Amino acid sequence: MEEWLKISLTLSLIGFLKEFRPSEAFYYEYLVGPKNFTEDQVNREAVPTSIYSTLVLQVFAFLITDMCRYKPLIIVLGLSGVIMYSLMLWTTSLLGLQIALGFNGLFYGTEVAYYTYIYGKVDKEHFERVTSHTNAAILAGRTSSGILAQVLVSVKWMDVEQLNYISLGGDAIQFNHFNNKQYFPAMVLTTLWACLLPSVKESIYFQSEEVGLLPFSKKVMSAFVVIKGHFTQAFTNPRVVKWGMWHGFAIAGYTAMEYYIQALYSLLQTEDQDLYNGAVIAVQTFLGFCASLLAGYVSVTWRNKLDMALAASSLVEGILVIAISQTENIFLCYSLYILNSTLVYFMTTLIMGQIAKEIVENSYGLVVGIFTFWAQAFTAILTAVVSSEGTGFNLDVRGQFVVYGSYQFGICLIYVVIAITNFVVSKGTFMLELQ
């Protein structure tokens, strides 16, 4: 087997395992149920901790990932998941929960190392195939964990607390339906498989062949010269800036909504209804995969009209989110959320494909990292404004979703203005050429 394929399979397995977290489908029910935290404690104090810590730790991880050559950060990703689920299982205090969600922030913050490892270890000719493998594995992990969570809870083979043992791994779980014990290694196996990844001898900036023998101080200077060049090339391109900004805005709104959607499900649930959060995640992820795949085959020959497409997408997202905020039917809420997610997957994949055509190849990881940070920063701002106690409006769940929908309308307005401005400028230029 070729070396690049071995690396791809190992990365894919890590991607599958890190996303195989059945407890994620019912984390809200777990916290306000068996853990006995109040809704306000979860929504106002616990969830914001995860969002803010992700923002801070993402900056730290982004700065040292290339310097540490990826693998150590991927191991930290696995370990942070082990610590997080251990605390989620055994803590009984709000402070313990906040610490656990701080490690959740570390988990998401260090994902940048996983997504950029291929750029430092795999030859350029294999980038597209390895990216395809890892993306498929990640989506397979999310889909299968959602299905498993839904089946186990629906047939009452497990409760929402026991799902956390599957996410953690390495602990014996007694099925209510079976007499034998099974072992489910998820975060533990993620860490172990990360240790088996080949070390990266050269990275893009700090450990490249050109600077490998230089003293550390000169390595840093040389690296920042290359980073500055990549940054300047990307962010002096107006198309990269406006498309990347939209990507950040869209992901921020979607992420903020995703953090609180289970609280809305719980609000809409009647006494005689079961929750189908796991099934929603499975369908959402599968349709997201299909939408991402479709976006990869869309040939955008109407690049100058893309701004209006972004405006239209934000308008539709805003309508869907406002509808989600007002519905009283949980199944309608599920359906609207899945539609919104599918649209986001399609448009963000399409936009990042367009951005990739505008930048130099080795700068893709840097540019994606910057836009990811942009998105997380806006997620933190949205959270502080709409839901955090003491710093924002402290809105209830429905009120938060009204703001998220209005936020999408605001993005729509911005890109309508950009599209009209571009049209007027281009028409003026055309008239001058005729003269």
Image (cartoon, rainbow, N blue to C red):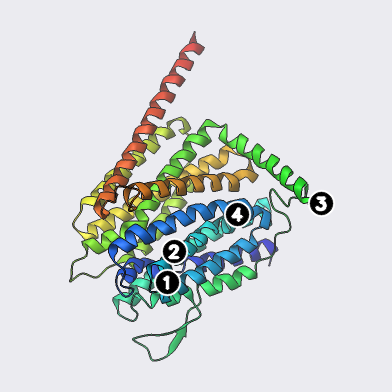
Residue 163: percent from left, percent from top: 39, 75
**On screen, 331 above or below 226?**
below
The label number, if any, that marks residue 101 in the structure image = 2
Q: Return the residue found at the far top.
A: 435
Q: Earlier in the sequence, mark 2 or mark 1?
A: 1
In the rendered image, which quarter is residue 276 located in?
A: bottom left
Q: Earlier in the sequence, mark 1 or mark 4?
A: 1
Helix, strand or loop at disc 4? helix
Distance (Cα) linking label 1 and label 4: 29 Å
Residue 113: percent from left, percent from top: 59, 57
Residue assigned mark 3: 213
Distance (Cα) linking label 2 and label 1: 8 Å
Could you tell me which residue is drawn at 25 percent across and 56 percent down?
333
- Between marks 2 and 3 in the image, the one whose residue lies nearer the viewer: 2
Helix, strand or loop at disc 3? loop
Q: Is residue 208 left or right of residue 192?
A: right
Residue assigned mark 4: 116
Residue 384: percent from left, percent from top: 37, 49
Q: Return the residue found at the far bottom.
A: 179
